Image (cartoon, rainbow, N blue to C red):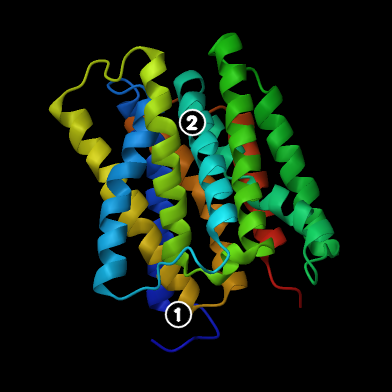
Amino acid sequence: MNKKNNIDLTGGVVLISFSMLLGLNQTLVKIVNYGIHPIFQVGLRSLIAAIPVLIFCILFKKKISIRDGSLIPGIICGAIFALEFVLLFFALEFTSVARSSILFYSMPVWLGIAAHFLIKNEKLNLKKLLGFLISVIAVSIALFTKNDLGEGGIIGDFFALCASFLWATIVLIVRKTKLNRSCPEMQLLYQLIVSSIVILPISYYFGFYFREINIGITIIFIFQAVVIVAAGFLIWFWTLSVYPATSIASFSFFGPIFGVFFGWLILKEEISILIFLSLALVSCGIYLINKNSE
């Protein structure tokens, strides 16, 4: 498909659908945590998701090679990816989906700040700086609003924020190293394969893999691995190959919105006025950071 200069109807539907999947993912992880230990869940999910991605690469003859200088940064990204999702999955053990969504999806804020110093031609202008300040206020509100889950909830909030930092770190490594020579599918394979190799052996030392596993949790877990991680990110990479990256990034503010919505809809989480305020501010901030300068 030819490159397009703007997001059309197809692109908009795809990007909003992908944002919905990402928002839903937080709720599904919290549900699966009841049946599968978070660390084992991270490793097993990566392993299962890698299989359809690898099949896709073979069928569509995608270039999957480690001889382009991408091996070392690919392994580093995979290890960071593993830690990122261990922190996120543990965060959802302790805090609400609403709070973790706001904190985790603040990633574009930290990426924008780091890119200002590390990536040429990605300096903060007044609009992006305003977006950053608004987002920092939003994250501060989320962090310092009373957490009904007590000290455990505060730990969960901290883990979600750290996972956001790690997500931004992965993006920076991809853009600043030879990993950017690899096709997006290969970048995803690095993260899935390395994280499964790192996490699955470690999970053994936590003493148990399964909690109260049942058919419902099993189906949700497989849906996560195959639909959200494998198919979802392959579709995401397709949009990157067709539409402008800056236009796509503007859709990232939907992530926390859908995260909070599904936490309320499925888990019946109560959402305070301050959390609504934090959600509105972080969404506005992310939009401003990613919006093209006029």
Position of the C terminus by quadrant: bottom right
Residue 264 in sight here: no
Q: Tell me where residue 180 sits by quadrant.
A: bottom right
Q: Which of the numbered marks, if any, corresponds to residue 8?
A: 1
Residue at 57%, 39% (x, y): give it.
Answer: 104
Element type at mark 1: loop
Residue 1 in sight here: yes
Amino acid found under the numbered disc labelled 1: Asp
Q: Is residue 25 left or right of residue 143?
A: left
Q: Is residue 217 left or right of residue 243?
A: left
Position of the N terminus by quadrant: bottom left
Residue at 49%, 38% (x, y): give it.
Answer: 82
User: Mark 2 or mark 1: which comes first in sequence?
Assistant: 1
Q: Position of residue 110 (x, y in %)?
A: 71, 48
Q: Position of residue 45 (x, y in %)?
A: 33, 39
How far apart marks 2 and 1 lie (CA) works out to: 36 Å
Q: Which residue is mark 2?
A: 86
Return the residue found at the far front.
Answer: 67
Return the residue found at the far bottom.
Answer: 2
Q: Nearer the viewer, residue 65 or 253?
A: 65
| Vertical relation: 119 (above or below) 5 | above
| Vertical relation: 22 (above or below) 178 | above
Q: Is residue 126 left or right of residue 35?
A: right
| Vertical relation: 68 (above or below) 29 | below
Q: Nearer the viewer, residue 170 or 103?
A: 170
Q: Is residue 231 left or right of residue 172?
A: left
Q: Tell me where residue 215 sits by quadrant.
A: top left
Q: Tell me where residue 224 sits by quadrant.
A: top left
Residue at 45%, 29% (x, y): give it.
Answer: 89
Q: Position of residue 124 (x, y in %)?
A: 82, 62
